[in-house]
Image (spheres, rainbow, N blue to C red):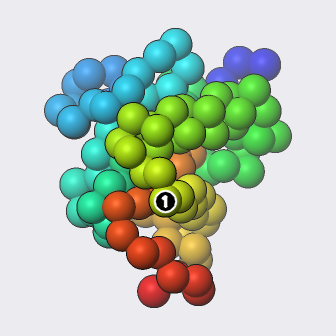
């Protein structure tokens, strides 16, 4: 299935295209990962699919292999970053859940104790 056209105003599409600078920590054919500019933990990396989908649910529905690629990238990043004690992988789906950029993305958080529930 073909991904929808990338919106001209999508920040993450611009990062994927190289039009907006970011500290890229991993990139492959299907995903790009970069450090969050407002980190919530010592390690806070965003993993985005190169395909534009508004959120994780849309990505899962239209491109399930892309969702699996995002999760594999997260595991690779956790290993590279030395998150041996564990890490949190978070999708915020929808404005009510705190999503502010409407391009599917996974937060990889670690490097400190991550209590549950979050906060």
Q: Residue at x 47, y 75 (%)?
A: 114
x then y, percent, for residue 11: 34, 42
Quarter of the image with the N terminus in it: top right
Quarter of the figure with the C terminus: bottom left
**On the image, which quarter does residue 26 sit in?**
top left
Q: Residue furthest left?
A: 21
Q: How many marks?
A: 1
Task: Tell which residue pokes out farthest to the front in this image.
Answer: 84
Q: Secondary structure beneath disc 1?
A: loop
Considering only vertical position in the picture, is 100 above or below 97?
A: above
Depicted 27 relative to depicted 12: above or below? above
Picture coordinates of residue 6, whole percent (x, y): 49, 29
The residue lying furthest to the top in this view is 29
Viewer-closest of 90 and 111: 111
Q: Residue at x 26, y 22 (%)?
A: 18
Tell me the residue at 62%/62% (across/down): 93
In the image, residue 119 above or below residue 68: below
Q: Is residue 7 visible?
A: no
Label 1 CA crowd tier, 10 Å (few <14, some 14–19, many 20+)? few
Task: Using the rendered image of the protein, determine whether residue 64 is visible from the camera's viewpoint.
Answer: yes
Q: Based on the displayed image, in which of its 4 quarters is residue 10 positioned?
A: top left
Question: Toward the viewer: 98 or 81?
Answer: 81
Residue position marked by numbered label 1 in the rendering: 85
Residue 9 lies, in percent from the top left, at 36, 41
Residue at x-position 73% and y-position 51%: 57
Q: How far across and how far down the image is residue 43, in percent?
A: 32, 55
């Amino acid at each position: 299935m073909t991904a929808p056209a990338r919106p001209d105003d999508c920040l993450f599409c611009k990062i994927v295209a190289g039009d907006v600078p970011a500290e890229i920590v991993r990139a492959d054919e299907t995903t790009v990962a970069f450090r969050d500019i407002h980190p919530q933990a010592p390690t806070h990396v965003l993993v985005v699919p190169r395909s534009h989908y508004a959120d994780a649910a849309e990505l899962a529905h239209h491109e399930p292999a892309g969702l699996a690629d995002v999760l594999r990238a997260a595991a690779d990043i956790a290993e590279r970053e030395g998150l041996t004690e564990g890490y949190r992988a978070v999708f915020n789906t929808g404005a009510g859940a705190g999503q502010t950029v409407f391009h599917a993305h996974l937060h990889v958080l670690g490097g400190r104790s991550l209590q549950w529930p979050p906060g």
